[in-house]
Each structure stands twice: as structure tokens, then as C-alpha cells.
Amino acid sequence: MIRDRGNIKWNAMMLPEHVKYLREWHENDQYVEKPELDEWALQELSEQLQKAFENGLEVELKIWEAKHIFKATGIIAKLDIKNSALYLEDGRKFPFPFIVGVTRYE
């Protein structure tokens, strides 16, 4: 079995600019485009959030922020339509446009 050291063996022959561009390229490769939700998906997302809020259920939100998707879990404390934001009981705030998915735990 071949045990390769990857880029480590090539670092001596690379210019610092090349190493910098390789690191930037690797970081950019991890970025995720914001998912575009159609009208039906937005309606379903809205209904799921409303039901979870009314019944006090724990939810797992998929949030797109800074070109990454991360998950946040908690119970919805407030749906602020005026400011277009959702608040969890632990004080975290998420704007509606950044919420791309929701899962309810019953």
C-alpha cells in the first residue's frame, strides 16, 4: 500500500504564493451556494415553523450564513414578523431569509 504524504513532500519546491493560493482554493472549495427555495418550499417551511412555535416543539434549523450551512437546535421563543426574524429560547436570533430548512422533533 502506498503511503503518500500529500502536499507535504512538495512544499519545499513551492513558492509561498503557490501555498497561499492552494490554501485559498481549498477554503473556497468548502463554500456552499445559498439554496434557492421555491414558493412551495417556502410555504412548507413557514407551516413547519408555525406548528413548532404553537406546540412548543424542539426544532433543528438549517441556517445558511457566510457561505456555509450550519444547524441550530432549540425551541422557538418568538417569531418576529415585523423584523423578519426567529428567536430561540436561548436568545439566538436568525433572520428568515437565512433559514433554509427545519426539522421538528415531536
Image (spheres, rainbow, N blue to C red):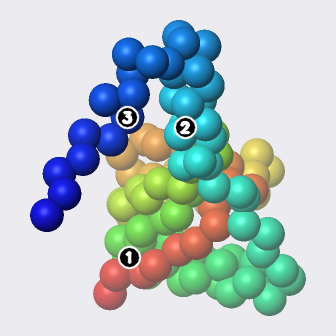
Question: Could you say whether the residue bearing mark 2 is in a helix, strand or loop?
Answer: helix
Is residue 54 visible to us here? no
Distance CA(mark 2)–CA(mark 1): 36 Å
Q: Which residue is mark 2?
A: 27
Query: In the rendering, which numbered label is found on residue 92?
Result: none
Q: Residue at x 37, y 34 (%)?
A: 7
Estimate how packed mark 3 is, as few (under 14), some (14 to 19) or many (20 or more) residues with alpha carbons within 10 Å: few
Q: Residue furthest left?
A: 1
> Residue flagged by tag 2: what amino acid is it?
Glu
Of the 4 image quadrants, the one containing the N terminus is: bottom left
Query: In the rendering, which numbered label is found on residue 57?
Result: 1
Residue 102 position, x and y percent, is: 53, 74
Q: Nearer the viewer, mark 2 or mark 3?
A: 3
> Residue flagged by tag 3: what amino acid is it?
Asn
Q: Which residue is mark 3?
A: 7
Left or right, residue 60 beside residue 28: left
Estimate how packed mark 2 is, as few (under 14), some (14 to 19) or many (20 or more) residues with alpha carbons within 10 Å: few
Q: Residue at x 46, y 43 (%)?
A: 92
Estimate how packed mark 1 is, as few (under 14), some (14 to 19) or many (20 or more) residues with alpha carbons within 10 Å: some
Q: Earlier in the sequence, mark 3 or mark 1?
A: 3
Please say if 53 is above or below 7. below
Left or right, residue 101 beside residue 56: right
Q: Nearer the viewer, residue 48 or 21?
A: 21
Q: Residue furthest top?
A: 16
Question: Could you say whether the residue bearing mark 3 is in a helix, strand or loop?
Answer: helix
Q: Residue at x 49, y 18 (%)?
A: 14
Please say if 65 is above or below 53. above
